[in-house]
Amino acid sequence: MRFSKIFIPTFKEAPKDVVLKSHEYLVRGGFIQQIGSGIYHFLPLGKRVLDKIKSIVKEEMDKAGANEVALGFVTPASLWQKSGRYQRYGKELLRFNDRKDNAFVLGPTHEESVTELVRANVKSYKQLPLHLYQMNIKFRDEMRPRFGLMRAREFIMKDGYSFHSSFEDLKREFDLMEQTYSKIFSRLGLDFRAVFADSGAIGGSGSKEFMVLAKSGEDTICVCDTCQYGANLEAATRKQVMPSTDAPQAEFAKFHTPGITSIEALADFFKITPFWTLKAVVKRAIFDEGRSALVYFFLRGSDVLNPIKALNAIVGANELVEASQEEIKEVGLIPGFIGPFALRNLTNSPYIYFDKELQDAKSLICGANALDYHFVGVDLSTFEGLEYKDLIEVQVGDLCPVCGVSKGGELYFTKGIEVGHIFQLGTKYSSAMDATFLDEMGKAQPFVMGCYGIGISRLLSAIIEQHHDEKGMLWTQATTPFSVDIMVSNIKDSAQLEMGEKIYTALSAEGIECLLDDRGERYGAKIADFELIGLPFGIIVGKGLEKGEIEFVRRKDLSKQVLKVSDFRALIAGLKEWISKCH
């Protein structure tokens, strides 16, 4: 492709309110252009990158036995109403009526549509398993779209949905998709980690996210320094923490603790570590139709409550908010002195949860539900009917749940950009939408489903966030719009132009994608655009041609190599080999 014939509007200055380098460089490099809040055009260079990403995704998905479809972007609201997500999804779901006053939505995801498609066409277990996927436009009405393609309202996504006759077969497909996604992101040249994750609004049990490791990532992820374990904070676990100090020796008793309302003060008062204290965290849970209730969480004083884990512990809750001291006092409790003794009788609350690491814990100190008093020598094994959940947020230095025992792996935090997510949905949507098949006994059963997404357009940003420098982008081998930028320093010099054309034709014939910069721009502008656009290699045809020389530039480190043009066939063979080797 000739630079003079392709639409690449480049800019020297960064757009206003740009935070991420990927956003700046994609706009300045002429890959994308904003048309509205969170809505972007993909220009020729951006479209070439999109197509290369899609091609790799399609190849690997097809190899895995999935079938590509194209589902309607506009979805009847009745399908979302049937699944129960029409109201629950929130304001990010764009709803509208057509001229006949029929309600529709712009799909941010297509579980309902594909479930209806399969319900209408698959009747027997003999037609299963089935995996359908698409690469299509989605719309999510983000309240604060930002970071360019990273959090846009309109985006391109690969979403796939599998249907099975058993949970065992779903697990097989889930594992296959984990392998398939790993192949995709490896081929794209990304440093990534598959991490355990919360299923969120999609639902189901068991999910993994694929995170591109980057300092600018929105998500904090917890990874092991020894093995491949990784998880989002809301899904991360650890090897159970063991005490580093001896347990305080005390018979069960009520102890006067005037003015001791914090864990720090309590530990200092009894000369112990917070590990031996029991902390109460009170929240207000919001349910459907505005109903709310106070919820009580208990964990060790040395731990921190994870809000997503806490929310997931409460069946039917949509949101957790802080409970005020006034609300706590209204139910007869005293902030700073809350404990589990007689708590259910005092509050009539069904929402009392203990962190699972507290099961049968002894030698604890906790609030006595009385002003200025705590209990010492508390033994939770003597309680009946306690409900234990995974509530705590792991901390840096905790031992890995996978290899912490055998290899001593420790957990640490890093930043990541979510580019893929796979879910084991189970029967959530099929049961809600009466989507069934006949099993071997002729009995109707709901489809067991899986869901698998990749943010296609978001990948452009993720790649650049991981591969850029202060001058511009650094595209990976698999995603670069062109491999080589052939820059003719002065197109008015016929010898330079002729040599540039000759190299362009020869490399193109060898299957190497070239961009010939034949514009009437000054040499400095061409070099600046080469550095900004980030093609892996550049060839400079300039004044050195008078001595029979050209320059070969590797964009990654801007290193240059002088090449002779006297033996043109050897030059092209050498360039081809060098490009292949450097890749």
Image: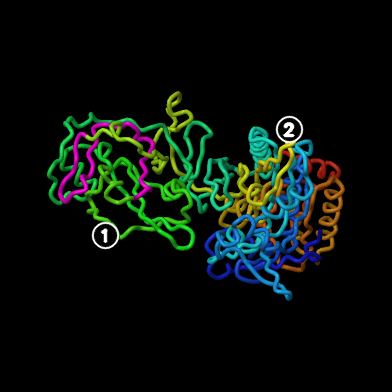
At x 73%, y 36%, the residue is 439
- Comparing 73 with 370, the one in front is 370
Can residue 184 be seen in the rendering of this structure?
A: yes
Local SS, label 1: helix
- Comparing 498 with 76, the one in front is 76
Local SS, label 2: loop
Q: Does the magenta stretch include residue 355?
A: yes
Magenta highlight range: 349-377
| Picture disc at residue 441 | 2
Q: Residue type at mark 1? A: Glu
| Picture disc at residue 392 | none
Q: In this view, does 193 lie above or below 69?
A: above
- Comparing 205 with 307, the one in front is 205
At x 53%, y 68%, the residue is 17
Front disc: 2 or 1: 2
> For the residue carrying disc 2, how many other residues have a C-alpha within 10 Å: few (<14), some (14-19), or many (20+)?
few
> For the residue carrying disc 1, how many other residues have a C-alpha within 10 Å: few (<14), some (14-19), or many (20+)?
few
Q: For the view shown, which residue lies furthest in the top direction?
A: 406
Q: Residue type at mark 2? A: Met
User: Residue 27, image x and y in percent?
Assistant: 64, 65
| Side of 264 relative to 559 (left or right) | left
Residue position for label 1: 330
Quadrant position of the C terminus in the picture: top right
Mark pair 2, 1: CA separation? 57 Å
